[in-house]
Image (cartoon, grey):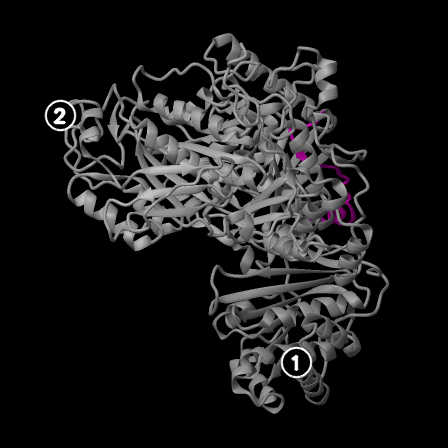
Amino acid sequence: MADVKKNRIGLEIQPYRGGKTTLCAGCGHNAISERIIDAFFEMGIHPKDVLKLSGIGCSSKTPAYFLSEAHGFNSVHGRMPSVGTGALLANRKMLAIGISGDGDTGAIGIGQFVHLMRRNLPIIYIIEDNGCYGLTKGQFSPTADVGSTQKNGQPNDLPPIDTCMMAVQLGASFVARSFSGDKKQLLSILKAAIAHRGTAMIDVLSPCVTFNDHEGSTKSYAYVKEHDEPSGEVSFVPFFEDITVDYDPGTTTAVTMHDGSKLYLKKVAEDYNPTDKLSAMRLMHETHSRGEFATGVLYIEPDKDDFLTQLNLVDEPLAMLPVDRVKPGRDVLDAVMEEHR
Amino acid sequence: MQRIINDFSIQIATVNGSGSQTANLVLLRSIFQMGIPVSGKNMFPSNIAGLPTWYTVRANKAGYIARKKEVDFLVAMNAETAKEDVLSLEPGRAVLYDEPLKLSELRSDLTFYPVPFDKIVATVCTDAKLRRLVKNMIYDGVLSQILEIDMGEMEKALRKQFGKKVKAADLNMGALKAGSDYAAQNLKKTDPFAVERMDKTGGMILIEGNTAAALGAMFAGVTVVAWYPITPSSSLPESLIGYMKKYRVDKETGKATYAIVQAEDEIASIGMVLGASWAGARAMTSTSGPGISLMSEFAGLAYYAEIPGVIFDIQRVGPSTGLPTRTAQGDIATTALLSHGDTRQILLIPASVEECFEMAQDAFDLAERFQQIVFVMSDLDLGMNTWMSAPFKYPEKAYDRGKVLDAETVKRLGGEWGRYKDVDGDGIPWRTLPATGMPSYFTRGSGHNEKGQYSERPDDYQRNMDRLAHKQDTAKKYVPAPVVDDAETEIGIVGYGTSHWAIGECRVQLEQEFGIKTAYMRLRAYPFSQDVEAFIARYPRIYVVEQNRDAQMKMLLRIDLPAGATSHVRSVLHYNGLPVDARSLTDEILIQEGRKTRDTEQVVTARHDAAVVTAAREGE
């Protein structure tokens, strides 16, 4: 089998795969897991250097279905951000990916989501967004649109939370929206997220085939396909690929990422600038008011200090520090005791 | 008049936010420096400024440092409480008061010392804004004269208190001297109380339990701390921040060998702790009752998915907001069983500042050994009050990092490893850490089998739960054993935490005043070891002393000990928010023993004790 494809660190795709999915056939989440497998494989990240985290819900089961050689932690409902924060504080060398859902993030976990974004923790934070609670049989979640209906016809009356708008406003340094059915765009976004240092918040519209794929739902495959408004083509060139891209600065924004990778974002509108918060917010607001949603990398701030940098931690993982670096000597205790005499 | 030397309590009644704490600590420290055992208890309101606060300094030549029920010397600075404070004193006591309050008209059986504080402070402090603060140092000066406290020691204590702030120290020194001069020229001592130099505090330290616990955590090698502000816990992480900045920053690089994060709430705090511990760090948080309630769901995850963690619970009065600035042992039962489903947690219960220091390392060692959360059950009295102690010993014991799989162990186990498999027969499985090259596993709170795979099989679930119970049995042999003092008697007292100090004094009162001998066992941990059951079986009547209403430790004894083993166990309960005192315990034990109490107790005394209800609830 000389022709088995290997990535740049010499691994085949097998260790990037996970257990067999237990989600419904056709679930958007499975497509996202596939793209995650592809992205990590193509970027040549060793699964053992990755931490997989999740909350509770259909989305949060998925870390079992990719990167089986990575340590994973399926935590409690809405609290993945804190667990991920702790894990990264303990080991800053790891690449963390957190999988959440629209209920896990937008309802029970909104507090932790907000503070994770504020901290710009270096983590890829994916919301597998289907606008409903699948695992408890289809109740509305906080990302359901006004007027969208449940299977029984009942419409949603409350306005949705736009997690991307929130993330931009709160301080995340990479904010994207995509669609589980758009393989190419999602893969580019995921690869760029891997290259990014800081919070990469990706809201992926991922239809629930069982409870939210009917006419009247604004999170069905048909509806999402029809109203997806790409903010422009997303091209990602990783640092290890020697490719020069000719681009027109008038129509494309080129971003150099933390690891040297390049991200080329083709503009849909002349006045749209993905490195400007206000511009990103305006794009989201305008597309939303047309009943559409913008997809692509909506906002990026490649050089913002992340939380671990701000804490000024030693280079080695805190979890691995030897005793002599964490246990002060006898002289220290003597000095402190003297202060209290 | 018979002089009473080195055996009295001083109560200073002020308004919170008036800056009296500095003067109070100078008073405490100066008596301590004279070699006399002391304790200081702050009874403060849940408020920043304007409400009544009392600080009690007890000097006791025999070394009793529990709160004393009776106030011997009152310093009345607060107009709002002065009348009630004076009326609650026993005859023969003394009152130092702010002259305009005209307190001497209230009683004829007390000694009164009027002091015109405003007039004196005006002579030493030209800045009107500072007078309110400096005024407090005047009562220290007056007390130095009346109680015969060495002025040199007072100055030394004052200078230590102000540290590098020389200008402020000088200003306060002026006030101290002015108070002392005023007393020397205008007041004639007629009360019996005085201090005399002793040699009982040489080499000792004065420290708060929260500071001691913070130090303990630093020496235990903590690397990740997540916390959320809550009284009376906040001073623990705040002291820790101070120490870590000073002693745990890499000298060459200037980088921190730790991360301390103020989280958005207690749920995030414990989430961060568990994430960090799961990835191999020694991680902790510190909180109080309301925080413990919020952490409950995560506590179940940690128990079932077997993740270490350390939580300091500085207990306060609940339920709900309760009395957030008063002390209690009210979280014992809920914490021992914290979370849903079947859960048993490990608790360590320090009684002294020294144990706050030592149990910090015990907590991390046990948490990593047993792969579960260890709760250190301190309380407000221990955590926030100033305690006298022998200096802490440098921890020689190596850290126990528990069963973490490495290449050598993999070889030894052959193919036997499974994340939740008991290969050693002690109920404790081997865990793996990320980034160590060891096999990965998917940590989950949902049902899992020995290999850590998702499972809803009845036999997998039950086997796992039985192993967790077995693990808890193993823990009984590892947790700190109770401290037992046996005696030829029918009465055994059981206590824990800060009740220890009042119990020690109570036992002497019972023996010296009533000829009643008692045995004593101080619990230091949950689950209970074999010694606990044995002690309870040895004595016909057992009194469990607790600072809560519902006899929570007795509940746990009843749950865990065999049927019938606790039928002779009674309760002595104290739950009014004040630290427990010996006399209340003595009286209650005498009542339950069918004996008469001390005659003087027929007089209803201290105002604060109106709510002391110490009843034998079950009537056994």
Q: Which residues are drawn in magenta?
A: B502-529
Give, as a three-letter code, the residue at label 1.
Asn
**Chain under numbered label 2:** A
Relative side of B425 to A332, left or right: left
Relative side of A251 to B160, left or right: left
Give, as a three-letter code, the residue at label 2.
Gly
Relative side of A297 to B572, left or right: left
> Could one spot residue B174 in this view of the protein?
yes
- The answer to whether residue B582 is above or below residue B166 is above
Whether residue B520 appears in magenta in the rendering, the answer is yes
Q: Nearer the viewer, residue A144 or B561?
A: A144
**Dot label at residue A153:** 2
Q: In the image, are marks 1 and 2 on the same chain?
A: no
**Dot label at residue B172:** 1
**Residue A110, position as x, y percentages in the image:** 36, 41
> Could one spot residue B494 in this view of the protein?
no
**Chain under numbered label 1:** B
**Residue B343, position as x, y percentages in the image:** 53, 25
Relative side of B60 to B287, left or right: right
Whether residue B368 appears in magenta in the rendering, the answer is no
> In which quarter of the view is residue B362 placed?
top right
CA–CA distance in space, label 1 to label 2 = 76 Å
Query: Of the residues tagged 1 and 2, which is closer to the observer?
Result: 2
Q: Secondary structure at mark 2?
A: loop
Q: Nearer the viewer, residue A235 or A249?
A: A249
The residue depicted at 49 percent of the width and 45 percent of the height is A258
The residue depicted at 68 percent of the width and 85 percent of the height is B174
